[in-house]
Image (tube, coloured by chain):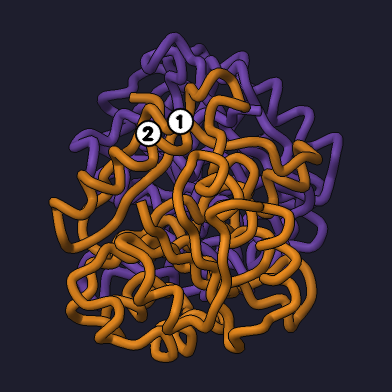
Chain colours: A orange, B purple
Amino acid sequence: MKLGVLGTGTVGQTIGGKLVALGHEVKLGSRTATNEKAAAWVKAAGRGASQGTFADAAAFGEVVFNCTSGAGTVDAARAAGEANLRGKILIDVSNALDFSKGFPPSLFTGNTDSLGEQLQRALPETKVVKSLNTVNANLMVDAGSLAGGDHDIFVSGDDAGAKARVSELLRDWFGWKNVVDLGDITTSRGVESYLALWVRLYGAVKTPQFNIKLVR
Amino acid sequence: MKLGVLGTGTVGQTIGGKLVALGHEVKLGSRTATNEKAAAWVKAAGRGASQGTFADAAAFGEVVFNCTSGAGTVDAARAAGEANLRGKILIDVSNALDFSKGFPPSLFTGNTDSLGEQLQRALPETKVVKSLNTVNANLMVDAGSLAGGDHDIFVSGDDAGAKARVSELLRDWFGWKNVVDLGDITTSRGVESYLALWVRLYGAVKTPQFNIKLVR
């Protein structure tokens, strides 16, 4: 399958690398077509890996991941281009963390909006599905590396079919057995606000290799 | 033991009722000494239950619970009186939910402050320990009623001894086996922000009888 990844940081490289390892063709997109981090990733990831602009990656992918930093997310989506993403699933992994006042970070979206919603408003004809932002990059792509995968991941989005498809992909690609559908894209506020607890749990457990399980 | 409970709503009545059932003396405090909800609770709870003003309940309790609504929390603390709470543990169960714009609620504290911190600032000589605000009232006092108690509760506070004492009380009184110490009182932001996810999980699971378990 052809997949696009917006963003060349740890999250984009980790997701892209896993998808290439699974045999997919992955184009990593950034502001420029010759981004050095992306070039190094292409070299390391090997066959199936390529790079380009945000627009190139968006046009290339049948499904696209947004792995840009929160502050750059909406600009990256605009650069990717509505036409290149029309009708496609965009899996939004971003977080609105603002470290400008030091630790702990706050959320620059406040708590009556979210990046998931901002992306959906910027790309009304794209099926934005918020997911994976509640765990560390390594855990995103390998749920089974923690407690045999017995913990939960969430999906938020306005399109039920897109959420069902993403839930399948998360299981098949990354080993997520428990995917909880939270509801429409406004539920992104819930998983994005959770980061305020995540950073404190990280402080308590001293490793990013943790997650939560919904007990009911 | 003599315990004070500030607030006469569902949370205050549920915690107060459980403590009376355990054989403790509990004074439920409100703005007036003759609050009708408190009077009905005293009658129903029976021996050991009494009512009074916020100041009466604060003076009465060796340990005090803040179960007032978030919007009324700091005013209630001031009415309770610094002198009545000096040196005591105040377990803060409140949430900063703002329903003025409808559902979902936002947090009126924003995400660079919290009610736990506001209380600690208002009562510098009191040992404020934030806890229990992440679960429904029934679950607060009976952790074992869900999955045999195999899920987590958090404590936040500046005084390590107070957090250790609260952790013991939560276990002995309410059956909480797993108490996670998140750190100082600023970590209240984490558990208070989590409410934005809690309300969406509630929407997904359709019952307030749920919680999260930290998987590490």
Q: Chain of mark 2?
A: A
Confirm or deny contact between disc 2 and disc 1 (CB under 8 A).
yes
Provide the secondary structure element on which disc 2 rests. Answer: helix
Q: Is residue B64 left or right of residue A44?
A: left
Residue B23 % position (x, y): 51, 12
- CA gap, disc 2 to disc 1? 5 Å
User: In terms of image quadrants, where is residue B139?
Assistant: top left
Residue A194 or residue B41, whichever sits in front: A194
| Three-letter residue code for mark 2 | Arg
Task: Judge whether B98 appears above or below A182 on screen.
Answer: below
| Three-letter residue code for mark 1 | Gly
User: In terms of image quadrants, where is residue A51?
Assistant: bottom right
Provide the secondary structure element on which disc 1 rests. Answer: loop
Q: Residue furthest top?
A: B148
Q: Please identify the quadrant where the C terminus of chain A is shown.
A: top left
Q: Name the residue located 75 percent from the left edge and 66 percent from the top edge.
A: A40
Q: Residue furthest front?
A: A47
Task: Judge whether A18 appears above or below A184 on screen.
Answer: above
| Residue B182 visible to an observer of this rendering | yes
Q: Which residue is mark 1?
A: A175
Residue B21 or residue A199, whichever sits in front: A199
Which of the labelled discs sits on residue A94, or is there none? none
Q: Name the residue located 61 percent from the left edge and 16 percent from the top edge.
A: B177
Residue A133 % position (x, y): 50, 55
Q: Which residue is mark 2?
A: A171
| Residue B97 visible to an observer of this rendering | no
Q: Is residue A183 left or right of residue B179?
A: left
User: In terms of image quadrants, where is residue B131?
Assistant: top right
Q: Name the residue located 45 percent from the left edge and 24 percent from the top edge.
A: B141
Residue B11 % position (x, y): 38, 40
